[in-house]
Amino acid sequence: MVREVLEKLELWELKDRRLSELSGGQLQRVFLARVLVQNPDLILLDEPTNHLDLKHQLELLEYLSAWAKENNRAVVAVLHDLNLARRFAGTAILLNRGFILSSGNCDSVLSGEILRAAYGIDIKQFMLDSLEKWRMDS
């Protein structure tokens, strides 16, 4: 099981290295691997994608999502990246100054009106404008 988890998190080749020799992203994946081999019913994560490049962020969240579904387990994660939250979360809680502003289905919680109330800007329009810049570069 340890080997399987280390391989899926792209850590097998690093198994003999000291923790002090690993990058922040590698350490993040090592700590997650340590949790996963314990096969818990629930995993609580605070910014699990911190220090990871985009490729590893996606791989990590895809792996956690598949793990939760395959094992009928739950993963609760704090994410500040709204794109990642929208892509991977089924249920969301949006906090504003320590209070719950909205909770429920991720699509409804991360709606334009609710995000505007939380952040004071039109997040949806910002995202659409950013996407348009990517399209123009193509």
Image (cartoon, rainbow, N blue to C red):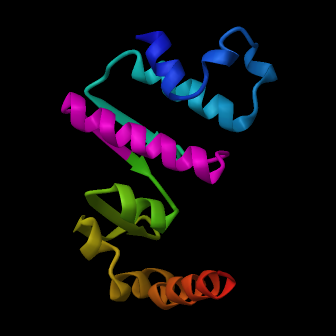
Residue sitting at 67 percent across and 38 percent down?
Answer: 25
Q: Which of the pair 99/138 is nearer the observer?
A: 138
Which residue of the protein is positioned furthest toward the right in this rendering? Answer: 21
Residue sitting at 49 percent across and 27 percent down?
Answer: 8
Residue sitting at 41 percent across and 47 percent down?
Answer: 77
Residue 94: in sight, yes or no? yes
Residue 46: in sight, yes or no? no
Chief secondary structure of the magenta portion: helix
Boundaries of the magenta span:
50-76
**Where's the N terminus, which quadrant?**
top left
Q: Is residue 39 left or right of residue 73?
A: right
User: In the rendering, at what x and y percent does residue 74 appear?
Assistant: 26, 38
Q: Which of the pair 119/18 is nearer the observer?
A: 18
Q: Is residue 69 left or right of residue 124?
A: left
Q: Is residue 98 left or right of residue 67?
A: right
**Where's the C terminus, which quadrant?**
bottom right
